[in-house]
Image (spheres, coloured by chain):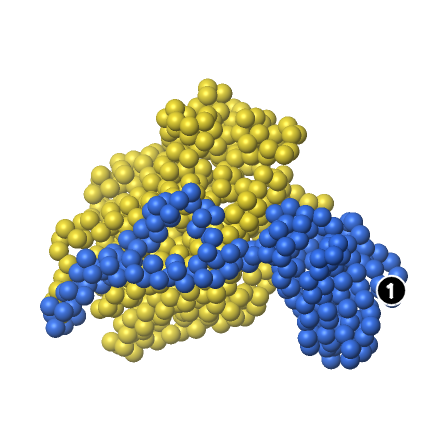
Chain colours: A yellow, B blue
Amino acid sequence: MSSFRSFSFWQLAPWGVVVFFVLKAIVTSIWIVRPWDIPDEVGHYSYIKDLATGKGLAVLHETPLDKETWKVFAPDNPPAPGTNWIAQHPPFYHIIMVPVYWLGALFGSPIWGAFFLIRAVTSVFFGLGIFVLMKALREVGLNSGTALGVGIMVGSIPNHTYLAGGVNHDALVFLFGCLVLYFWIRFSLKGELSDLTKLGIALGLGGVVKYTFLVILPPILALSLITIWRNGSDVLKQSIRILLLSTIPIGLWIIRNLFVYGEAMPIDMTSFVSEEPLNISLLEFGRSFPVFSILMQSFWGLLGWMGDGLIQIRWLQIYTIYQQAYTYPLIGLCLLTLFYSAKNGFSSGKRFLWGVDRTLIIVIVLFYSDWLEDEYTQYWILIVIGTIALSWRISDCFFGFSIKAKDLEGRIEVGAISVFFFFLCVHILKIYSFTVSSGELQGTFGRYYLPVVGFVIVGFFAFGLRKFPWASQLVLGIGILYSCVELYIWLHEAIPFFTVYG
Amino acid sequence: MDRVFKFLFSVPVAGFVSIAIVSVLTLLILQEDSNQPFKQHLWAEDIISSPLVEGSVFTQELIIPTGLADERFQLAIFFGSEEEASIGSAEVSLTQASYSQTHVASNVAPHPILRKRFEFDGFSEALAILSIKGMAGNTQLAPGVLGIENGKGAELQGLSREGPFYLSVDWIKIVDGGKKLSLSFPNQLVAVFWLLPFAGLIALSLAGMRSTNVG
């Protein structure tokens, strides 16, 4: 078979994915997901409205939710609205949405025109994020078909369709996460100043969308500084450029916070305080809760929030059978990376041993810690296979580095893994501290990982997919499976869920 | 062979196949009803009633919630037992004035808890009496029903134990499969517009599969 697709097909197909994804998200956000049924929507909308109507930036613990919005949000609950907890977030998403609010307010009623236009524009951000992700995957050597397939997979996760069409900053966080990945890969491969500048801008702007995004700042800066140092030209100038570009926006926000609150980054801790805090160590915490399983299952699909008008959160966690349909293909992709990492080792006994002994140590530590005790079966398998695949891949890469083999993609994969692990560790520590102080498990939402989705794909799967000759067919096949499962979930579970109180 | 392959994965064929896949899948899903939790019992500390021995009848007043009146719904009752060998059958009836519907749950064997769902329809938004009867052959090893002590409204009647006991029940709405699309979308055109991206993404996947460098 030598029937390649035309160049124009590969130029247009990624845009096709964006158009179809955005269309799906917009129609879903207008007709299926009710207003206020996406996490914190009432707070984000109120924040935008305050800015658009000249009331300025909301102040944490002081600025109330907009009264008109509150009346629509809770029609049967006349008490005065509480303060807007979303005021804790930096304002970049909300500032971008101000002109969208003005435009939307020209159509329909004062609330709905603006509300649905903001939802629609937000879904465009998510769609563009998928596009940038596909471009980033091309940069690390995946062929067009494989990159397209991964884009379709990411766009066929119910949580993404659902979050994309919301008055919520998660879609923009995803877009900036993908932009950072793309420019970081390009700079690491080519060392061009323009890519470094764009990387700095993406890091800086992403940091003023959501604090969570800032977690990727230290590892990306460290990796970029290493690249600058290795390239050896204009080290000081380039280092200052990336440091300034990435930190000035959040620096300005911190200065504002210091004036207003006397704190750099105040956050709303009201729901994380309990009279009965837990007294457990980090190790006991890991053994007591299936944290990874909860993160993963909510990453696939945790729908709903407060759309009932009863001021009560109502979730639809997609059922295990659907989660399995999403998880097992990932296990397959991990196995692919493991297979090719091990195959690399067949070239020399030393290289093979280098992979085996380090992998064994990590797996033994993982089992000895008992952290997997409560994890659900499918995620247990994913963690174990993923850990083995990664350990082997990293060991193999380091063997390559030790013999000075030129493996730029390998460096990028190890870098992407380190960004993800840094993010994971910080998040686990945050979950732990909030859980201890509140007395119950807190902050286990898979959507928090949107800034590092691309890093996970590059770090875990890119190597196997680059080596496997049928990778594009495999991934596109998984894309079809994901699309069918998503359709099934929306039609069979989510539509009834959102209309059950109708 | 190459021509056949090119034809099979051409954009028009991929588009046609993907529309067919989405249409068939949609039609199949619309054949199935969906059960959605409507109102769930309080997750307070559960207690188990006395066993449903032969002839025992537990009754409790329930108010059919708004949203389930004149609709098909399921009522989930939790059976429980601390005995491993527990087994028994129960007759579950819901009655409103002269209107009544009855189901039989045979060989209920909770270890330690079992949720059984019973379907009802045609009840109006008013008071109804739920009765759970221990059937012939039930012994002291028969299961009891699960409840809580700190509930609201009417208590479960007919228990041989003392103290307050409120039956734990979950209300589940049955959404008619054929009505799912019309529940969300104002007309068929919008529904088709929503299904189109699924077909589009599948079509792109199929068309993209033609790219290969494998000989």
- In the picture, residue B166 is in which quadrant? bottom right
Which residue is the extreme one toward the front?
B98
Which part of the image, by quadrant, shows the N terminus of chain A?
bottom left
Q: Which of A425 and A139 is in front in this view?
A: A139
Q: Which of A294 and A436 is in front in this view?
A: A294
Mark 1 secondary-structure assignment: loop
Which part of the image, by quadrant, shows the C terminus of chain A?
top right
Left or right of B89? Residue A416 is left
Residue B183 at what x, y percent from top left? 48, 48
In the rendered structure, the residue with mark 1 lies on which chain?
A: B
Left or right of A330? Residue A148 is left
The residue singled out by tag 1 in the image is B161
- In the picture, residue B108 is in which quadrant? bottom right
Which residue is the extreme one toward the top?
A54
Name which residue lies at 48% across and 57% down.
B177
Residue B106 at what x, y percent from top left? 68, 75
* Amino acid beneath label 1: Arg
Residue B53 at what x, y percent from top left? 81, 74
